Amino acid sequence: MARDPRADILEDDLFPKQSPRIHRVHAHRSTDGTIHFNTRGGFMGINNRQPVELHRGKIWHFSDEEKQHLFLATAAFTFALGVLMAGSIFGISQGGLNQWIATLLLSMPVMLIAVGPAFLLHEIGHKIVAKKYGCWAEFRVDPSGLKFGIALVALTGILFMAPGAVMVAGLVTRRQNGHIAIAGPAVNFSLFLIGIPLGGIILGLTGATESASYLDSGAINLKAMIYDIVYFWIFANLGLGFFNMIPFGPLDGAKIKDWSEPVWFVSFMVFIALIYMWWTGVFSPIDDATLRIAEWF
């Protein structure tokens, strides 16, 4: 039966002349069982001309592309922290270019050892739990976030960087998504707790008791560097865990709260309480715990 043209006045045409284009994901399986597919639009930071590897083997698996992204993000993050310790580019006018470069080069290994695990293991925590639930999960760097973070710290001395994130593809429940999200802050909280006694042992054995300039009369002050490694390990893990628990935007806190408000509230309040006690002097993880342990050695 022919369609009455007067129906166009009341409703849309249910039979368009041209069918809509359907997005298709082309995939193929290689001989080792790895599935390759092209996203044709991509996730953040993925080069769409390169296939994304969906590995269905071991949970602890990192593709070559993911390793490159992790290395780039860690290197940029370490450099930004080094610039921060050197006093941004305006620190050049205070002690001269040579002093600034020396501080930068000595600060970078300190920050790599102290803060690098807080960032890397946080992301790997997300990855492992996501793969446990059968998802594809790989870290991808955000080049614009790295450039903005380095420029900001260089010009203002303020560090705010979004180096990237673990991209997850797969079907998960709200509960499983909450588990994936809370894995990162849980890793940071664990590293924070581990850092207190372990840091105390390291400080006690080395005799490093306070922070100071890394250059002392032209010589490298290793004790000051060791102290700062312990200090920033504890500080960075507490701070990174707290920041990611904020229930806003793409941060982990929003996903955790969506899964369970009680779990999010208790976890968030633990971070807030520890930061508040440290800030007000009620309890300092360094002075009242780590250094006390160091005295036993």
Image (tube, helix red, strand yellow):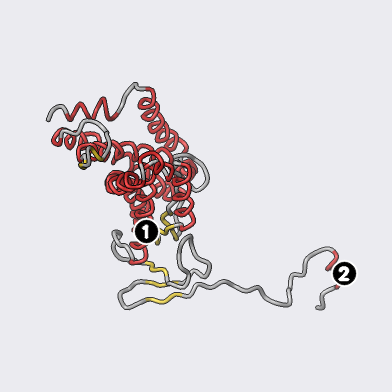
Q: How many marks?
A: 2
Q: Position of residue 265 (x, y in %)?
A: 44, 34
Residue 222 figure quarter? top left
Assess disc 1: are there few (<14), some (14-19) or many (≥20) residues with their C-alpha within 10 Å of its C-alpha. Answer: some
In the displayed structure, would residue 1 be above or below residue 94?
below
The image quadrant of residue 136 is bottom left
The crowd level at tag 2 (other Cα within 10 Å; few <14, some 14-19, many 20+) is few
Residue 284 at least partly seen: yes
Can you tell which mark lies on residue 72? Answer: 1
Q: Nearer the viewer, residue 110 or 240?
A: 110
Farthest residue to the top: give it.
282
Q: Which residue is mark 2?
A: 6
Give the mark nearest the N terminus, 1 or 2.
2
Q: CA distance from mark 1 to mark 2?
A: 62 Å
| Amino acid type, label 2 | Arg
- Which element carries disc 2, helix, strand or loop? helix
Expressed as whole percent of the image width and height from the top left, the position of residue 47 reads 46, 68
**Residue 226 left/right relative to 70:** left
> Closer to the camera: disc 1 or disc 2?
1
- Residue 169 image position (x, y, % from top left): 45, 60
Can you see residue 194? no
Kindly identify the residue that appears in the image at 84 percent across and 68 percent down. 7
Q: Amino acid at mark 1?
A: Leu
Q: Position of residue 116 (x, y in %)?
A: 31, 48
> Quick one: SS at disc 1?
helix
Q: Nearer the viewer, residue 213 or 272?
A: 213
